[in-house]
Image (spheres, grey):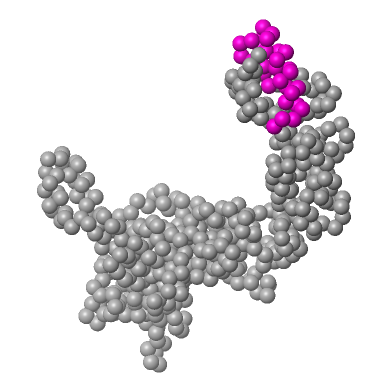
Amino acid sequence: MDLPKCGSVQEISNALSTNQGSIKVTGRLIQHDCINRQATLGDPQTSASLCVDTSLTEPLEGSVGSLFQVIGEVEREDGGDTPIVRARIMRCVDGMDLLMYNRALRNQQKYFQSRNVTLVRHN
Amino acid sequence: MIFPRESLTWDCYCICYEMDVEEMEVDGTENHSLRNDKIPKTLCGLDFCFHVFNKMYIDDIIALEKCDVIPGMYWYKRHPIYKVDIMGVVVKRQENVRCFIYAVDDGTGVITCCCWKSRLHEQSSEDIETTLQRCRNLPEVLRKKMSGVLMSEAKKKEGYSLGDLVHIRGKIKIFRGEREVVASYHNKLEDPNMEIVRMSELPILYRTLYDMDTLPKKVLEELSEMSGQKKGICHGEIVPELKKILVTFIEDQQPEEISVEHVSKIPGVTVLLKEMKTSEEKNTQIQSALDVLEGEGRVFTKQKNHVYGVINPGCSMERLIMDILKRDCVKEKFQNEGCHYLHIVDEVRKSPDYSAITNSCVLTCLNNLEYQSDVIRTSFTKYFLCKI
């Protein structure tokens, strides 16, 4: 069975600098254009924002101002600097504690880094 | 959408504070040399990971090593795993006649999960409305409850949709060449904070459980030494094997006495102990097997060294016990219920041949007498003669 690629969890600021691949980002919906199928996801902490292409996930449940989690592929427009995420899954996560989420995410990444370190030592 | 946040976030805070402790670095240096040895098949049950639905990253589940010895079992480092517990977002959904197949993504990997449909749902084709009509006579509260239950059942019938956070527990199976989880429990989670709870739990679980060994280090070292040497039976299993051979020998031949030399000449024993080099080692093994038998009451040490008398039906101790009972059962003290077996043991020990006899030997003898209907057991501990 063809499985979709796993979305590695990223913060919006990181997502802006990744080149390709599937990611999972969480942010607040700042803008949503149904007709052009575009949305903008913003990080409440920093002021970074990310463009999302919602062709596969319209109609969207939830309104502007809700927290959303997006899983999709990062693509860069031809010659453009701004990346755009082609969303496969848009999930409303209202009620999620973002501080806790970021903390848990950092701990998870710390653990994965320590794993890689021991692997290197072993080899 | 309002979620009951208070209790949940408190738990999250607790977990996060625990995690912030930087000193939780695993010292992996000692385990490196033993990393490649696996626990033998018989000891897998000692590891709790064998019995439990293991919360793991999907990435790790996909990368689990298959176990050659036990089908359906996989290894994570040195833990045997066959059941997992995952929590993730549904990224692909497929409905078949009998089951739903979801692809679940938790941020580290994607795996397919198979959720079987309930047979009951196939059969009942009634609408919610008609069922509610039938329950018109119930009080209001129960009717509301009934409609709530029917609606949740209907939702379950439809399955989960893309983007739902699901919690799945099940066994790892291989279907058409791909690894998948066959769900025995699956549920949709409404609260997104559960994802955070799981993300916080997992690194701690890994550091304290999966990356550590269950068995103590000395045991593991001994196991790895043994697996290098032995081809046949493991060291700890020789004595039980010997014991089995001795028991069959005693039951077949019914000798009056056996000695260590006698035992070492039994054909089964020579095969078993052929790997031992010195006869001293062989003798110590035979001695331990005989000691075990003594503890069970099959043999007893005679006065000469290394010679063991065997308790068989018809041995001389039986005659002694019968004499003791004939003498004592007429006495007033024992007339009602019979002699307590410890009294019998004391009397037997008075005779010079059996001065060091164990309780279990006397009990075996008494059991043999009971089989032959010479003695009757009046209570749990008391024996009486059948014919005076």
Residue B146, x across and y down, in percent: 20, 47
Residue B341 visible within the image: yes
Rendered residue at 24%/82% (across/down): A36
Residue B173, x across and y down, in percent: 46, 66
In the depicted structure, whether residue A89 falls above or below residue B224:
below
The C terminus of chain B lies in which quarter of the figure? top right
Rendered residue at 68%/72% (across/down): A121
* Residue nearer the viewer, B293 or B330: B330
Magenta stretch: includes residue B339: yes
* Residue nearer the viewer, A60 or B339: B339
* Residue nearer the viewer, A111 or B17: A111
Residue B150, x across and y down, in percent: 22, 52
Rendered residue at 39%/56% (across/down): B185
* Residue nearer the viewer, B24 or B318: B318
Residue A39, x across and y down, in percent: 30, 77
Magenta stretch: includes residue A117: no
Furthest-bottom residue in view?
A79
Residue B210 occupies quadrant: bottom right
Instruction: Look at the image and give the residue range highlighted in magenta.
Output: B313-341
Residue B21 occupies quadrant: bottom right
